[in-house]
Image (cartoon, grey):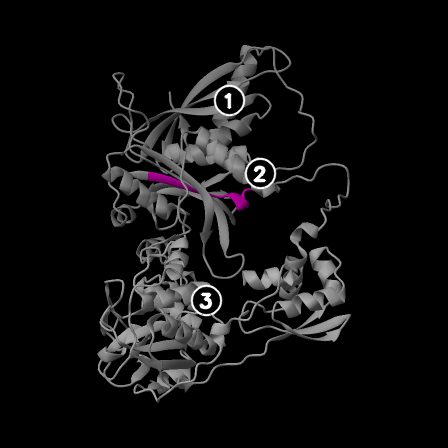
Amino acid sequence: GIARDLAAAGIGTLKADPRQEPVTGAFDSPIGVTISSEIAANNAVPAFYGRYIRGVKNAESPDWLKARLEAIGLRPISALVDITNLVTHDLGRPLHVFDADKLSGDINVRYATNGEKIAALDNKEYELSDSMVVIADQAKALGIGGIIGGEETGCLEETTNVFVECALFDPISIAKTGRKLQVNSDARYRFERGVDLQSIAWGMEVATHLITEICGGEVSHVVKAGEVPNPRNSFDLRIDRILELGGVAVEADRAIDILKSLGFEVSGSAPVITAVAPTWRPDIIGEADLVEEVLRIVGYDKIPTVPLERESSLPVPALSPMQKRVGLTRRVLASRGLYETVTWSFTDSRWAKLFGELKEGLYLANPISSDLDIMRPNALINMIAATGRNQARGFSDLALFEVGPEFFGDQPGDQRLVAAGLRAGATTERSWTGSRRDVDVFDVKADAEALIEALGTNAANVQVNTDGAPEWYHPGRSAALQLGPKNVLGYFGELHPKVLKALGVKGRVVAFELFVENVPMPKKKGTARPALKASSFQSVERDFAFLLDESVKAEAIIKAAKGADRNLITDVTIFDLYAGKGIEDGKKSLAFSITLQPTKATLTEEEIEAVCKKVVDAVEKATGGSLRA
């Protein structure tokens, strides 16, 4: 390939390889070749050539051959093995040589039987299935077709008669077998990427020349099974497309010369020519590939540097608003003491089933491992598993987050961006002050609300729906965050014990999920900051305690108190919750403070009392509670 490119660029002339000239056989091969009907029907092995060579001497390779192999990091073994390695790496044509005296009858290309085993040349034994192609004789499998040969029929120093294999294999079949068996060989690497279809003929001749020149011997006629495909992939090339796609104007005659020198058969003339791809170029699939071939020889350095046109003199932002939002999300969560994790976008289907019903399209056709066989339907799964691994190593106090996609289908758009976090263990390290406490749902609720605020939405407007959390959260200890009845911003709460147990986590874990794309984008504002509205008057705080039903939410009290006088009341804070002795069953006492901030004049006692009365009336009306004496 390199020699052909150099010749096309005008650096020398491509020489014909004399080793590809046919060798006349002196006798009929005593070993025949057949391809099973199942293999032929699936086109798994389109063609198989073989040749018997008798009277060889498998001695040490000559110095020139050993030097070439050592130059690319290969260790010389013996002449017959070294020859197959040379042809594989030099010409991209894998071969295999059997010790003919170790074969039992003719060669048969067939599918393996389930459970059939073979000891390979890499000193490993492989158990095969009925989807794998094997090269076999009448007694057993000799090698895994197109991937690796068997140890039992390998060539040794005492080998005197050999049978040379040169075949074509289906790339997809080779890839599947190689992945199942985890075999990475030079033959597999080339066959699964596609070899020159005509190389089955000239590859046999090259191998024959090298074996007879180095090892001697007498050759038989070639035995053949199957037919060599001869696809004629023809593509039209509009000459002006070279300029349109590549940015370089190339004359038609120059383009035609380049393509011909690269092995294409070219017909027609400008403005449209037709090129037939050579058999060694299965990667040519369209007009753009022909443009690339021409440009590669002309030289990519000939492509002029052209600045992109701008609609204005102002630079275009490199990041979209959503991309900026992702970066802001990471900074906010990190500033709250959470450590960022970057986990796989796929997970274990056994875990994923705990997070809702799974669609068939989420399963991976070719997972990198058996425990990563499905796209993750929830971003918490891998973080929970990571928590279990940390606990097993003695790290029990954790605060983790991840910003990334989770998947709920196999169609475009069937994924969403989520910011998920979890906390486990205690909030602080052990201290003599005794201030250490375990994490709870309010810690992750604060994380979620802080993120909502940072993204430009007032967290006070977000409703907490205690009946809206999904089944992987603990019922009664979790909730959904919503803007209105339909827009769910996320969830927070304690994770369900069955989920934690399945993923190997001990103790309590609290978590949150925020769907970043569901949080409304802030309204566009001017570039100037709004004026600071600072008051020079003293603020006033007043405390209240109400007797309420246990079912009343603190959120209802806060909203009612703030709504009593939005001009003066700037903050409402819950500071005490009590139930027990002195409080009747089904009731609770909730205490809160309000902050009054005047802006025009210091408040009089009468004005303060009037606001306090409004607060009491508003809370009693909203909750049905009563002010405690």
Q: Amino acid at mark 1?
A: Lys
Q: Nearer the viewer, residue 470 or 304?
A: 304
User: What residue lies at 40% left-to-right and 60% top-to-bottom?
Assistant: 64
Q: Which residue is mark 1?
A: 613
- 431 lies left or right of 363: left
Residue 44 visible within the image: yes
Residue 622 visible within the image: no
Q: Amino acid at mark 2?
A: Lys
- Secondary structure type for disc 3: loop
Q: Which residue is mark 2?
A: 324
**Marks 2 and 1 close (CB-CB < 8 Å):** no
Q: Nearer the viewer, mark 3 or mark 2?
A: 3
- Figure quadrant of the N terminus: bottom right
Specify start and end residues of the magenta stretch as a single range.
Answer: 510-521
Q: Is residue 515 a member of the stretch shown in magenta?
A: yes
Name the spot of residue 478 as percent of width and height, x first. 37, 42
Q: Which residue is mark 3?
A: 92
User: What residue lies at 47% left-to-right and 82% top-to-bottom?
Assistant: 228
- Secondary structure type for disc 2: helix
Earlier residue among tags 2 and 1 = 2
